[in-house]
Image: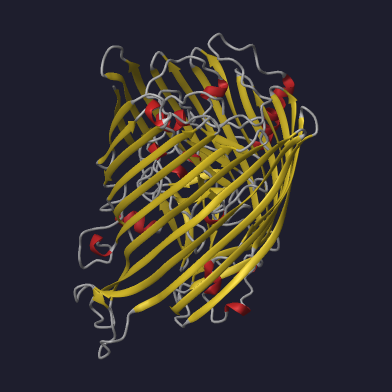
Amino acid sequence: MPNFRCVCVSPRALRCLLSGQDAAFPLRPLALAVMLAAFPLAGLAADAPADVGAPADAANANKAMPQLQEVEVSASSGRSAITMAPVQSELDVTQPTSIIGLDWISNHEPPTSDYAQIAAMAPSVTSISPAGPGLGEAKQVTMRGFNDNQYNVTYDGIPFGDTNDFSHHTSSYFPAKMIGQVAVDRGPGGASTIGEATFGGTIALRSKDPLDDFEVIPTQTFGSYSTTLSHLEFNSGRMDGFGGGKLIASAQYYDSDTFRSDSGVHRKTAYIKYVQPVGTDTEITVLSNYNDIKFNNPDKTTLTQAQINMLGRDFGLNHDQFSTDCTCYNHQTKQTDMEYLGIKSTLTPDWTLDNKTYTYYYNNDSNEAPTIGTNASKTDMGGVLKVNRYRAYGDVLTLTRSMANGELRFGGWYETQKNERYQIALDYTLGGIHDVKAGKPDSNSYKYNMDDWLRTTQLYAEYAWKANDALTVTPGIKGLQFQRSIEAPINQTTKTPLYYDQTWRKALGYLAANYLVTSEWSVYAQAAQGFLAPNLNQFYVPNPAENKASPQQTMNYQFGAVYKTERFSADADVFYIDYKNFPLSSVDPVTKDPIFALARGARMYGVEAEATYYFGAGVSAFANFSTIDAQFKRSSLDLPNVPDGTVALGLSYEDNGLFGSIASKYVGEQKVYNSGFNPDDATTVTALGKSDGFWQTALSLGYGRNIDDSFIKSYKFRLQVENLFNAHHQVADSIKNGSIYYLVLPGRNWYASVSLGLW
């Protein structure tokens, strides 16, 4: 991204003027890809308009990281396709990458957003929020068809996620006001890309940086579902008495009833980041983020069509204590935190060091799965208390040596997680006590009780060889080691004791090249291996040593081009992924036990592109799309819950303090199959369901001004409307007992905000 201060008042892009009604896929993606790829060759870009800024330094592959500082109101100067693009790539990339900047996040996403809502603006990324934007856990957050536990999510380069299956909780860590940038890397990256799921891609979040000047910024938001969000941000500015140190601290509280009935959420968040220069060659960063969340969680996370017709699209919970859908039996509390100490230092003219030592924590106490009937009585109301908590400690180290013909990078990542998991059966009729069998008051009521550990080590080396001024070739190698250990007096599924550990190791190779055709146009290619250790569920069997679960592995091939001028910015790519050992999990409809299947092979391929064109006078247009073909090799069945493509279209405007956008995102058709089908045998599919592709449109409008000679430095008003045309969509999620279960998307919802810059 260009080195400019991201403005909280800049454009948004339109998501299509199409009506938002269900429609057949409206574009021919391959033809559009060819057209976009040909733009640089056709010399489409015209002379830059008068109000664009100076060209970016395209040739600087090692440019400094831009400061992610949110300015409430800024002059509308230097507009161009580069500064106004909601998503864009960079000329020096070696894999498809979409960067979503702070101006887009702060002006054109709902203030309640989570990272998945933001990332969904990129091609090949989808996210469904049944409760409303950021008001509950997002579902079906996919990238090129990879599920949430098959790619990395990082925060300032630190991977985080659940120890059991590498999944993430989209609304549990970093709300939008604590995010300065989202980069969607669609591919395994290079050898220096770290994380448990290095093959599916990376959603890389960056924290906001402190402002250079003292400022206090209060923000108040009101919106649909009785939503209120209060946010207060404090910036110390550069403190000369502390050697130029800078501090940003913020506190946020939001409360919402959410789209689903009686499914309210209450969240408190605190964030602090301090950056301290030490001399001229070293910078120390300390960051902490804390969340406390309470919410009612519907047991019916998905609904059949019959339930939707009978209960309504927004059904979640009720207050009937004789119903299993009562809020009194379906509620959760969560606490999360992340802290790190980072050091960046130029050790010598040739050597630099970047190190982060960190910890993060997740705790979830969930009252769920209510039933009528307990061990004490067939008429008592029963349920489950599920506890899942883990603490991770780790370190990320990178050493870089600048050399005459390139740059050598090597380093490593180590992390250890301890995870405590248990479920206890409850009898609510008897006061919520542990459910024990009659006549056996001393027996425990654990459904499972286990501690598990995950220890991950990754060491890497890569060399960015500058063959000449235009060509950079980067080979690399990475060594992985995953070790799982479990101590389970009562193991999940088997209910028997298990004390076991297993280790997986793998060496992975990478090769990438980037060629700068001109100062405005580059092409790149990548071949990379991916690896993911098996899920903890491989231990949910009587003898894990005999379990045939295998690590997931991929071979990825990608080719793309990036073109950037002040008038026009675009990139496009093609990809092919050869996937071995694709895992599936479902629930047996009779026993309710988990079922695990392993497809011996799958393949994915497709085309992706994104572009922004600046017309001048503050007006720009953008578009992106992807087409995805994902099938199991042996059966030729489409992968379940994988959309066949995405499209986004938009227009945006910014001038004289006024900004706005209208934008539409299309998510393609997807299929679901009956539980327990064999992905290698098409004849085992006894039930098939699908959901058609759909459009959703968003509108953003805002106005802001700076004020001279006042303690109120600036003000800004903003209105965000999601699902502008109130389209009623539902997405097939699974099939159980022959019935299709759907995720129901909210109707039209809105959020109005006012913020001030003080002192």
Q: How is the image coloured?
A: secondary structure
Residue at point 45%, 19% (across, down):
653
In the image, is residue 483 above or below residue 591?
above
Residue in front for this viewpoint, 182 or 280: 280
Q: Is residue 26 visible?
A: no
Q: Quadrant of residue 519?
A: top right
Q: Is residue 125 visible?
A: yes
Residue in front for this viewpoint, 607 or 248: 248
Residue in front for this viewpoint, 242 or 480: 242
In the displayed structure, does residue 380 sit left or right of residue 566?
Answer: left
Q: Residue furthest right?
A: 467
Residue at point 70%, 25% (across, down):
521
Residue at point 73%, 42% (across, down):
463
In the image, is residue 447 above or below residue 213?
below
- Residue 266 lies, in percent from the top left, at 27, 49
In the image, is residue 585 above or below residue 114?
below
In the displayed structure, does residue 510 sit left or right of residue 375?
Answer: right
How many numbered marks have been drawn onto this rendered protein structure? Answer: 0
Q: Quadrant of residue 625?
A: top right
